[in-house]
Image (tube, helix red, strand yellow):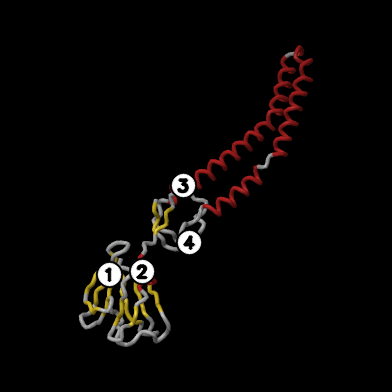
């Protein structure tokens, strides 16, 4: 990653260009005119080592009080620009050079827990609905058997009682089922947890594998670590 450091022509603040991103530092008119609009380039070697280089030979750059054209520096070094030795807020600027990465791997467990819990609730509700249909089946079965043989007629009361008991149990299961409340609670928790680690944006009700097909967060543009 490379930064271009210089004086902003409109505000005379310190301007730092990182690709298409532009940041301004300091007060208006705080950067003297002997600092060029494109004064020096700062390149990251690793997390703690950088190279500062004048963009033009006529530009003046100081590192720890020594004038340089190109110099390997660390975040603890003092960098000044121009003959007037404008002090660069190096630590603040280096924050830009940290890679904008969002580790979304923990979201896989969040999605799996939500998905499995949702499926479990739906299966339980399906069982309750099936249980409510059994009395209808028993009633039809009893009626059919009676039509086939009069000898079965004495057992019709038994079929009716069993059907009524199952019906009552089915109504009880449906009445006491908290599936709707559980789903709402699960949904709210999921919306809190299934978010971009960088900006906190909710990822949507999207399968984790589909989420991984994207490379960046659409909100903060952080690159996904998958």
Separation of residues labelled 4 and 1 (CA atoms): 31 Å
Lower sequence index among marks 2 and 3: 2
Are the two marked residues, 3 and 4, in contact with CB atoms closer than 8 angstroms? no
Q: Secondary structure at mark 3?
A: helix
Point out residue 173 in the picture as x, y percentages from the top left corner: 70, 35
Separation of residues labelled 1 and 3 (CA atoms): 40 Å
Lower sequence index among marks 4 and 1: 1
Residue 90, image quadrant? bottom left
Residue 49, image quadrant? bottom left
Are the two marked residues, 1 and 2, in contact with CB atoms closer than 8 angstroms? no
Q: Residue at image x 20%, y 80%?
A: 57
Separation of residues labelled 4 and 2 (CA atoms): 20 Å
Lower sequence index among marks 1 and 3: 1
Point out residue 60 in the picture as x, y percentages from the top left corner: 25, 82
Q: Which residue is mark 1?
A: 73
Residue 94 - label: 2
Between residue 152 and residue 179, name the one nearer to us. Answer: 179
Residue 108 - label: 3
Left or right: where does residue 25 sit relative to residue 83? Answer: right
Point out residue 157 in the picture as x, y percentages from the top left corner: 79, 20
Q: Which residue is mark 4?
A: 199
Q: Secondary structure at mark 1?
A: strand
């Amino acid at each position: 990653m490379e930064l271009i450091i210089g004086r902003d022509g409109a505000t005379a603040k310190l301007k730092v260009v990182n690709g298409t991103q532009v940041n301004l530092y300091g007060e208006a008119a705080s950067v003297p005119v002997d600092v060029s609009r494109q004064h020096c380039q700062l390149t990251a070697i690793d997390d703690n080592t950088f190279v500062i280089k004048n963009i033009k030979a006529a530009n003046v750059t100081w590192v720890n009080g020594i004038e340089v054209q190109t110099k390997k520096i660390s975040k603890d070094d003092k960098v000044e620009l121009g003959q007037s030795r404008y002090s660069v807020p190096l630590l603040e600027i280096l924050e830009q050079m940290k890679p904008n990465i969002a580790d979304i791997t923990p979201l896989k467990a969040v999605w799996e827990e939500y998905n499995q819990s949702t499926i479990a609730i739906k299966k339980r509700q399906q069982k309750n609905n099936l249980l409510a249909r059994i009395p209808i089946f028993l009633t039809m079965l009893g009626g059919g058997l009676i039509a086939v043989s009069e000898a079965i007629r004495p057992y019709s009361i038994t079929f009716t009682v069993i059907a009524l008991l199952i019906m009552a149990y089915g109504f009880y299961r449906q009445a006491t089922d908290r599936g709707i409340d559980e789903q709402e609670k699960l949904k709210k928790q999921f919306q809190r947890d299934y978010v971009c680690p960088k900006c906190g944006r909710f990822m949507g009700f999207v399968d984790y594998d589909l989420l991984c097909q994207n490379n960046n967060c659409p909100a903060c543009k952080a690159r996904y670590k998958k």
